[in-house]
Amino acid sequence: MCFNGIQAAVNEPGELPWEVVVAYFAVALAIAFYFGKKYGGLKAFSTLDLVYIGIGAAFAMVWEFYIGSFIGKFLPSTPFIGVGFWGRLIIVFIVAGLVRKVGTGILTLAIFDILGDLFHYGFGGEPMFLIYEALTYGLFVDLMIALTKGKIFGIGHVNADPSGTVSTSRANLLAIVEGAIVGALWAFPDPLFYEGFFGPFIYAYSPNWAKIQFHIIAFLPGDIIFGAIGGFLAYYIAKAVGQ
């Protein structure tokens, strides 16, 4: 049986067990919402928050599928370079820095996915792609928002030193470190979750684990570097707009 192009294959050789994937999503969501509720990161979105999220998601879609794709034509074709993906990463991190509420990442990536379907991919395979984008890339951002008590990328930490010198340096370091951590996490969804489960589930093929391992190694350096840049930019943009 096939629905919207989804083969619903769960027994392909080498495919991640669906029970493991479902358990991951359940546990990760529970952790994000528990810490978000406990530390204040989980709050209702204001109209301004939704504006930031909507504009950020739209710009991320335009960058990845049009601007980044065009720039990529002039660069070597290699998994070590992902101009479109890195641009999306930075934009989403900036949105997270402006809003800083649990659910920001999931909602931003959900809107990004829907816009991508409208203007680029089409809706074949949905809602699996929406689940994949929102509950991997988006959820990783929300986990960091929750664990930092709504002060992701060092935003809100400049209070200790009246001169601002020491605490600003600390905030800069937090922005870079936290951005690098989330950037590193963003290296895993495409090879591990998509190539290891969602792709086989939708299209019924056996994953190539040598390729998956290679892609994780290839994606990590660039995603860490641009994650650090994204965290740093998010800190200063949030500071500039008074968030």
Image (cartoon, rainbow, N blue to C red):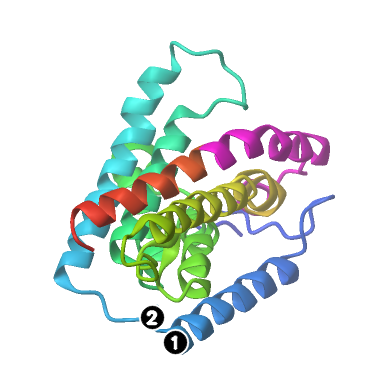
| SS for callout 1 | helix
Look at the image and tell me in which quarter the C terminus lies.
bottom left
Magenta-span inclusion, residue 169: no
Badge 2 density bin: few <14, some 14–19, many ≥20, Cα 10 Å? many
Amino acid marked by disc 2 = Leu
* Res 42 label: 2
Residue 49 is left or right of residue 65, and the answer is left
Residue drawn 44% across and 19% down?
Answer: 72
Residue 222 is left or right of residue 67, and the answer is right
Badge 1 density bin: few <14, some 14–19, many ≥20, Cα 10 Å? some
Badge count: 2
Q: Are marks 1 and 2 in contact (CB under 8 Å)?
A: yes
Q: Quadrant of residue 46?
A: bottom left
Q: Is residue 218 above or below residue 5?
A: above
Which residue is identified by label 1? Answer: 37
Is there any visible trace of residue 113 in the rendered image? Answer: yes
Tell me where residue 65 appears, x and y as whole percent. 37, 32
Residue drawn 47% across and 57% down?
Answer: 170
Looking at this view, is 133 or 206 the one in front?
A: 133
Is there any visible trace of residue 112 in the rendered image? Answer: no
Label located before the other in sequence (1 or 2):
1
Magenta-span inclusion, residue 212: yes
Most distant residue in the bottom direction: 38
Q: Which residues are magenta?
A: 199-225
